[in-house]
Image (cartoon, rainbow, N blue to C red):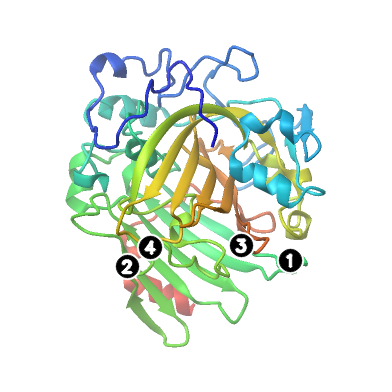
Amino acid sequence: MKKLTLLASAVAMVVSCSALAKITPEQAARLGQDLTPIGAERAGNAAGTIPEWTGGILTPPAGYTPGDHHPDPFADDQVLYVINSSNLDQHRDKLSPGQIALFELYPDTFNMPIYPTRRSASFPQYFYDATKEIATKAELIEGGNGLANAAIGIPFPIPSNGLEAIWNHIVRFRGVAATRNGGQAAPTASGAYTFIGFDEQIMFKYSHPDATPENLMAENILFKFKQSVTSPARLAGTALLVHETMDQIATPRQAWTYNTGQRRVRRAPNVAYDAPGTASDGLRTTDDFDMFNGSPDRYNWELKGKKEMYIPYNSYKLHSNELKYSDILMPGHINPAHTRYELHRVWVVEATLKDGMRHVYGKRVFFIDEDSWQIHVADLYDNRGDLYRVAQAHGLNYYEMPAHWSTLEVYHDLNSRRYIALGLDNEDAMYDFSVTLNDNDFTPAALRREGVR
């Protein structure tokens, strides 16, 4: 990877992840001033190609009703230019090695339509207030495998190391609770695929307006997640339950599965790290889900700084219910005609496998949007140091919350020339962020009921 040029408010040097100092009140005072409420640079760039952040999307488009697939507030934007294999060299400095590999692997079909940059990320005021409240208090627990003195907000809006930055992604705001329908597909080299349908429920304990550092640590839960497979028939009824902990030294992640053949709920300690993702054909790991999840303890984390980069953003066209899954899925990669890329500033975090630890990824490089702390691109290397996979999260603003989150995650395996698209929902009901969920919805007994109904 080329040496990164650090921007004005980025770190002046690479900081060891062993440095866990809290930020000062003077630094925290910058939040909401020259920095956005969650730590991004408010100003645009010198070239004028990245605008100032002015609050993001503050009101839904006219005619929108919660439950609709989200109308594109930027539908009138025109493509500025398209990056393809013929002009790739002009844009290499604003692409990741993984993105470049996709151009080289699919020179005739892969491209990136570049649109004007819209800094649309926005969040509730209580989330901004909490970020400022905890900014001088939040800290990593021993080894960096959990949080203390943090609730609701971004714990490290001015990160000093890679662990802090990755925890910002892990606990970023995605609402308080949600139900999700849709699924995934992993096309073969010819483009044939089987759609795997999911029903999912998630409850973000960390983000609840009443959450406090004290009650989060007492319960030791960040979120609870339940997933059941709805199709095809041979897999329907298989279900998964996860309790993600805040202090993973005190209690590691707890997981259970329900198998329709055995009709039993079983503890599933292997639902973590590089275990294959659900029905993924081995094309992604468990900790690839959401671009990265789970304990960071197997890696050394390094904050490399910031760079300007083309990332998938404001992906309302890809999200539209006017598309069928067959419009999106094609051999090699999703259909570029429905994608949107923009120039944004991203934090670059490099994770290197610790000596004595095992994982199929020897190195992972994450490119994290400064306005949301969402990982938008991940380059994944094998244990020989070769580029193995590249993942991209196509994000948008769910303006009824509001929250910035992905609508589709695409994981490319460069060796098999296959990919898996996770989060397909164009032909299904939209996320419901208004749902009320409680702890009784996330018990092993509830998992069994989910599996048999």
- Circle 4: element type: loop
Type of residue at label 1?
Ala
Q: Quadrant of the N terminus?
A: top right
Name the residue that disc number 1 marks: 189
In terms of sequence position, does the residue under pointer 3 or pointer 4 come before the other? 3
Give the foreground label among 1 and 3: 1
Which residue does the image show at 47% across and 34% down from the upper left? 348
**Distance from Cα at disc 2 to Cα at disc 4:** 19 Å
Bin the neighbour count of mark 1 within 10 Å (Cα to Cα): few under 14, some 14-19, many 20 and up: some
**Distance from Cα at disc 1 to Cα at disc 4:** 28 Å
In terms of sequence position, does the residue under pointer 2 or pointer 4 come before the other? 4
In terms of sequence position, does the residue under pointer 1 or pointer 3 come before the other? 3
- Circle 2: element type: loop
Bin the neighbour count of mark 4 within 10 Å (Cα to Cα): few under 14, some 14-19, many 20 and up: many
Q: Is residue 205 visible?
A: yes
Type of residue at label 4?
Ala
Q: Is residue 69 visible?
A: no
Q: Which mark is residue 272?
A: 4
* Residue 218 percent across, percent down from the top left: 17, 50
Q: Is residue 36 left or right of residue 422?
A: left
Q: Are marks 1 and 2 in contact (CB under 8 Å)?
A: no
Type of residue at label 3?
Gln
Residue 345 quadrant = top right
In terms of sequence position, does the residue under pointer 1 or pointer 4 come before the other? 1
In terms of sequence position, does the residue under pointer 2 or pointer 3 come before the other? 3
* Residue 380 percent across, percent down from the top left: 51, 51
**Distance from Cα at disc 1 to Cα at disc 2:** 40 Å
- Circle 1: element type: loop
Bin the neighbour count of mark 2 within 10 Å (Cα to Cα): few under 14, some 14-19, many 20 and up: some
Q: Which mark is residue 184?
A: 3
Give the foreground label among 2 and 3: 3
